[in-house]
Image (cartoon, helix red, strand yellow):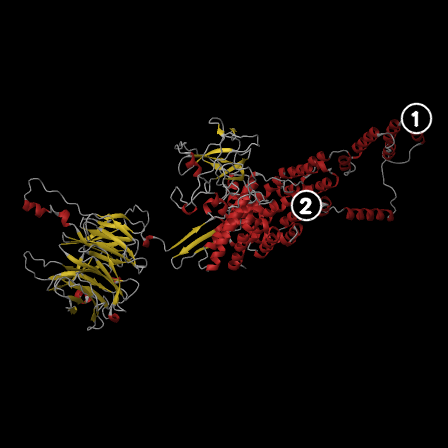
Amino acid sequence: MTKITEIEEKSAATAWSPIQSCSDVIAIGTKDSGGIGFEDTGSELDLYDLDLSTGNEPRLLGSVKTEARFSSVSWSPETLGGKYPMGLLAGGMKNGVIHVWNPKAIMENQPSLIRTIKQHAPGPVKALQFNPLNQSQLATGGSDGKVLIVNLDKPDEIFMPCDSTQQHAQITAVAWNTQVSHIVASAAADGTVAVWDLNSKKAWCELRCEAAGQAVADLQWNPTQGLHLLTASADDRNPVIKLWDLRSSTSMPLTTLTGHSQGILSMAWCPHDEHLLLSCGKDNRTILWDLFTLTPIGEVPIDEVSQPDSNTNSQEMFASGGLASNHQRRYDVQWSPIKRGVALTCSLDRKVQAHSILGLSSSSGRPPKWMRPSSSVSFGFGGALVSCGSADRFVRMSTVVEEESFAKLSADFESVLETTNVAEYCYERATKTQNAPEAELWAFMQIIFDPNARQQLLVMLGFDPETIANKANAYAEDDLANGVEKLAVDDKTGGPMTTTTEQMVKEAIMVGNFDAAVECCFRMGHMADALLLASYGGGDLWTNTQQRYFEAQVEKRSFLPLVSAVFGDGLADLVQRSDPKDWKETLAIILTYAKAEEYHALCDALGDLLEQSGDDRNASLCFMCSMNLGRVGKYWRQQLDEVNKAKGSMDLAALHEYVVKVAIFLMAVGPTSKLCPEDAELCLKYSSKLAEQGLLVSAAKYSTPDSYEGKVLRDRLYRSKASPSCLAAMGGVAPEFPFTMTDVKTSRVEPAKTSRNTRQMRTQTSTASSYSQYSQSSGVPNSYASQTSQRSTPAPNTAQPDSTGALPAGWIEIQDPSSGKMYYANQTTGETTWDRPQSAAVQVQAPQAEPQPQQQVATPATPSKPNKLVSKYGDGFVTSASHPELASQYGNVGTSNPYGGTRSGIASVSTVEKAPVSGTFDPNRIPELSAELQPIKDCLIGVIDALKAVPSMSGGDKRLLSESERGVAVLLKRLALGDIPAEISAKVLQMAGFITTYDFGSAQSVLTDLVSTDWRDHKDWLKGVKALLQLARKIWNR
């Protein structure tokens, strides 16, 4: 704590000003006359301005002389209807007189004395306080044991709280209740505290705080709780502060604060933080207490005093302050009613000091109440905002959408996809957009969803087969109408064949030499005749003839290279030699003649050709035809980069448009298509932005597990409040855990040697969760697996164990975290035991007089008395391992009674009925479920937690909630044990999904079906789930 300022040479009683405009002003009533002799020359009442805000020296504002010394001072707020704007000052004098002044008149050097009260017997009036709830009332306590209530509004109204009884020793302190205006308490030197009720004019209660003859030095009411009271003991043998809760007991304190080594002189309860208390005592300590932890957290230091030299005589020692350590003993502490964290102290060395706790380094780590925020707000994943305020006790959860336009774009897109066919959506985009390139892109996107896409793309490129056929027919008819019957050709390519030529061709055909006949026709320029004859001469001749014809006529007829490429498997060369400006014609040829196995490669080749020529937009259309997302996405990314560069940051609308194109294209390509790293990164950014707006399901739909950040995002979405819906959006497969599990091994602690009977009493529950299945590629778990161990104690037997060797199959060794000892768990059966299981055991047969079937010898545990079952741990919990009557009564998991009813020495082996599952609901020990059943646990536990947070719940609803907890506990344990058939688990999972979406009607239908068909075998949990759904519908039904 830090000293702010001080006033020296003042042994005084003090009071803070309660007026906001004069918060730095204090009143000092001196306890000595200020003279140098033994004569009593009266005292003074001074008003000082401590000027705490500027740090200047205290300034005297006014002073008034009194005929007697002060014992106490009290200052009231504005009183008497505003007549005294600076309140009133009351002083309790050493001679039993009480004076009341107007502090404003004192500062103005005007007559200030308002009233003098002489009702107490001569003696100091140490107790004085104005009523904080009724400022016209003043409570006083004198050395005569009387407590007087003075009404300053009515000069003649002075009365005692009780006419019949009063305390019989000097009153050391009075305190008005902070919540009830007619309750006042008084402490006396005989160790009693009386709480007076002014309305009934009698004592409400009396506290025997100290032993007879020991004084109560001070008392304080809790500033915020009207039934909490603190008393301080002046007894050096027991210097404690006692906290009383008058609701609980008036004979025994609620707790005791111990820290002072000698009697306590004064204390003050902080008006701004009910957890802070200051106390000072005879041990020269001024302690700051934290009542939340009931421990001291700080101390007001005393001034350092220089030690006198060894040659200093006694007179110089007194003059130099050699006894200052005792002189600095503080006898009064007071908190400022306005300045938070500022306190005033008075000490025997005649100093009045002001201190601040604002710089205190508290060991508790708790800041003062006024430094804590009156409200709190915190953002969480998925745009979640949690807030609370001081006005009520509610914690509010909401979703904050920062980018409303972006969120609306996404929501509208998802809504359209739910109600509209994808091809229809593409058609609407193509027809509504004003941007021609975008319209062409969406037209292409629409066509790729058509079953006859290649034919439709031809039409879109302007090559409709039907239209072209009609034009060709019309063109031929026009030619015939104009009298054109044959093509005009030169002498080398047409004309009638000569007789000699005809004879030569005829002779060649007659001998079957079509090669010679075709050669003769070529030489004479009869191309048509050559082609006709070649068609009959075999495949090789036909091919060679075609090739010679194309070579001879290519320069005269431009369509012939096309025909050559089509019928000669030369489409690839045709694409490479094509003009990029005529890309539509080339693409039309590919669409018409390309085989299925070469179609995509030819489209990519044409796209590469256009890309090299700088035509990226049309190249992207070719890549769309080849269904090459990686290549077409490159152009879309370029568009996005240009928009982002122009804006200077990520344009969310452009990002949304990019993801829409990718998503639609993926629907056409198929779910097996994999995004390239660049596309995956942009989809991850889009998904993250959606999650920030609270659109968790949409975020899960577009999240990708291709990077570490993507895996983390998917894991958070899977564990979010919309877990079931997010899981469905991810394809129904739980995402892999993105973090590496580290197995932290602890050093083994050997268990202490104990008797066999003691070991048989022990049971241990262990729930071990692990990620058991790991991805071979990344080395991180790709599914969540869990193992649950249950309470079990093995039946004692006479088998002789093998003390060496490995554990049997299925058993593992685990260290108990509480004791450090090792125990053993069977991963298959869930059984646990303190005894090391043996891999092989030899059964000892009981002696038999005659040959009989072999029986297992079982040694029963020592019988216990049912009326005196006491846990050896002393915690009131008794294991059923040694008490089968408890196992049969409560059905403890892992324990059973092998004795059929009577506990004879030899038990026959019989089938033991499966014990019911315990319905104890422990949130910290809920069993883990498989990944596909995890949504059941998340949903039901979430509903229970939400119901527990409902502020006002009737007794009937609380009983329903308790029944729900038992049912859910049984359900989850049976699911973990695999004790529920798969078809019932599927129904429960379906019901949990309906509950998550607040579709209570559908959930009720599923539950009704379960109750009607499976009640007999599953009523132990169906009843609780039914109660849970009933309560949820009552509170949240929409």
Mark 1 vs mark 2, CA separation in Å: 56 Å
Q: Quadrant of residue 503?
A: top right
Is the residue 808 above or below the residue 38 in the image? above
Q: Would residue 522 be seen by someone viewing this image from the given angle? A: yes
The number of numbered discs placed on residues in the rendered structure image is 2
Q: Earlier in the sequence, mark 1 or mark 2?
A: 2
Which mark is on residue 321? none
Q: Secondary structure at mark 1?
A: loop
Which quadrant is the C terminus positioned in? bottom right
Can you identify the residue that label 2 sits on?
448
Q: Amino acid at mark 1?
A: Val
Q: Could you tell me residue 1016's position as x and y percent?
A: 59, 50
Q: Amino acid at mark 2?
A: Ile
Q: Could you tell me residue 986's position as x and y percent?
A: 60, 47
Can you identify the residue that label 1 sits on?
511
| 904, 219: nearer the viewer | 904
